[in-house]
Amino acid sequence: MPYETVFEISWQTFPWPVLIVGATGFVLGAVVLALRFCRSSRSWRVVGIALMIMGLFWCLKQVLDHYRLTQALARQQTQVVEGHVSNYEFRMHDGHGFESFFVNGAGFHYSDFVPSGGYHQPASQGGVIREGLLVRLHYLGNTILRVEIAREP
């Protein structure tokens, strides 16, 4: 059966919004350090430096994770599962969709709200995964790197 690729992580640009968390931490740390000069407390300097370091590490981790995932797919170092989508569940929480499902015993879950470089688009937001659909998924852990859907010849 021929498959059509409908999502691949390498088609996506880097998910820049995930860096907002790290950038916010870095900026808060810089503000704390700047305001610390108005106060003589050493603990404020430690807090400011810690926030800046955590912000930088968060950003670096996101960039390295995206690179690792795209390289794993390019080198075909992923797990692959093929079959029909089963036990599909969709839940709404605070206006955001959460999906979970199984394909041949492999379970997946994601949300449009939780930052991810992999496939994370629920059906309510135009996603393609539905109960009974014949798919082939390339993944690492719970991160879906490629979604292929069976097409009738």
Image (spheres, rainbow, N blue to C red):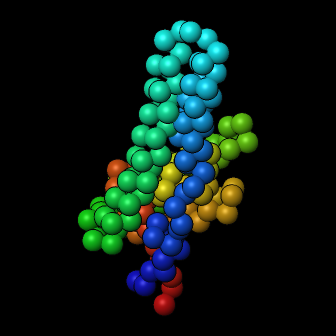
Q: Is residue 53 above or below residue 148?
A: above
Q: Is residue 76 above or below residue 152?
A: above
**Percent position (x, y) of residue 98?**
59, 45
Q: Is residue 115 above or below residue 3?
A: above
Viewer-nearest residue: 32 or 66: 32
Kindly identify the residue that appears in the image at 64 percent across and 21 percent down.
Answer: 35
Numbered disc total: 0
Point out the image quarter for the N terminus.
bottom left
- The outermost residue toward the bottom is 153
Viewer-nearest residue: 84 or 48: 48
Kindly identify the residue that appears in the image at 51 percent across and 85 percent down.
Answer: 152
**Percent position (x, y) of residue 112?**
61, 50
The answer to whether residue 77 is visible is: yes
Kindly identify the residue that appears in the image at 47 percent across and 46 percent down.
Answer: 59
Left or right, 1 with reference to 78: right
Kindly identify the residue that appears in the image at 38 percent across and 60 percent down.
Answer: 67
- The outermost residue toward the right is 95
The answer to whether residue 86 is visible is: no
Viewer-nearest residue: 64 or 105: 64
Query: Dividing the picture into quarters, in which one does residue 130 lie?
Result: bottom right
**Percent position (x, y) of residue 69?**
37, 60
Left or right, 65 with reference to 130: left
Q: Is residue 56 above or below residue 50?
A: below
Viewer-nearest residue: 69 or 39: 39
